[in-house]
Image (cartoon, rainbow, N blue to C red):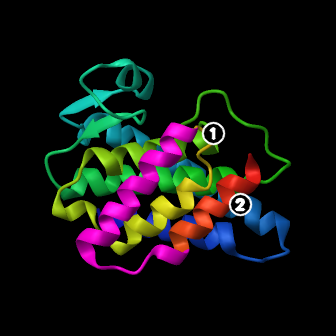
Amino acid sequence: MQDAIILCAETVNLNFSHTTQHIAKKEAWLKLHSAVEDWQMYLITGVQPILTINGVKAAESEHISTSFPVVIYTNRPPFYTSFLFHLSCLLLLQCRPHSLRRAKNTCLKTVPYHAVHLCGVSKSNRLAYSWDPILIAGLLYAGKYLSYCRQQIELLQQLEALAELTGWKMRKEIKRLQELWKASQ
C-alpha cells in the first residue's frame, strides 16, 4: 500500500507542477504511466474485490440503489489501493502530453470512467476505513467529472452523510461542487 501512496503522490505532483520543461514532463509522464500499467497487473492478480457489479447493471437492478459500480473489499489495503489506482489514472489522463497519442490497450480509460469508479469504490465500502480526509479530497476532485445527474445526487448524499457522521466541515466544498455542476448544465 505504501507504493500505491507514493505513486499517487508522484502523479499528483506531476499533474499540478508548473514546469515548462516539456521533455522532462513527458519523460516523467511515461515513467508514471508504465508504473500504473504495472500496478494494474498487480490489481488483477493480487487485489481482488469480493464482489463487483458494473454501474449499468447496478442501476438496472431492483435490489441495488446506486448508479455507480459496486466494488466491495474485505479490508482497507485493497480498498485504498484500488481507490488510489483510479485517482492516479484520472490525474495521469489530465496531464498526458499532447504529443503522446492515447494507447489502445492501456489501463487509462477516460477521466469520467475513473471518476465514476472512484465514487463507486468509495460508496461500496462504507466501513470506518472509508472515511479518510485523503479519500474525501479524491471524491471531491472526482466529483467534478460526474455528468450523470443521478450520480451527482448520490455523491452529494454520500458527502453530506459523511459530514454529518464525522463532523467535518465540508459545506463550502460541497456547495462549490454543486455550483460547478450547475454551471456545466
- The residue depicted at 84 percent of the width and 50 percent of the height is 98
Q: Is residue 33 above or below residue 103?
A: below
Viewer-side residue, 182 vs 51: 182
Amino acid type, label 1:
Thr
Q: Position of residue 179 (x, y in %)?
A: 66, 62
Q: Position of residue 83 (x, y in %)?
A: 38, 53
Q: Position of residue 13 (x, y in %)?
A: 60, 73
Main SS category, magenta section: helix
9 horizontally vs 50: left or right = right
Q: Is residue 63 above or below residue 33?
A: above
172 horizontally vs 24: left or right = left
Q: Is residue 60 above or below residue 52?
A: above
Amino acid type, label 2:
Glu
User: Marks 1 and 2, Cα distance to the nearest angstrom?
Assistant: 21 Å
How crowded pointer 2 is (Cα within 10 Å; few <14, some 14-19, many 20+) is rated as few
* SS at circle 2: helix
180 horizontally vs 156: left or right = right
Residue under numbered circle 1: 110
Q: Earlier in the sequence, mark 1 or mark 2?
A: 2
Q: Residue furthest left?
A: 74
Residue 51 picture quarter: top left
Residue 19 picture quarter: bottom right
Residue under numbered circle 2: 27
Residue 72 visible within the image: yes
Q: What residue range appears in magenta?
A: 149-172
Viewer-side residue, 16 vs 161: 161
- The residue depicted at 79 percent of the width and 45 percent of the height is 100
Q: Position of residue 41 (x, y in %)?
A: 39, 38
Q: Is residue 124 magenta?
A: no
Q: Is residue 166 magenta?
A: yes
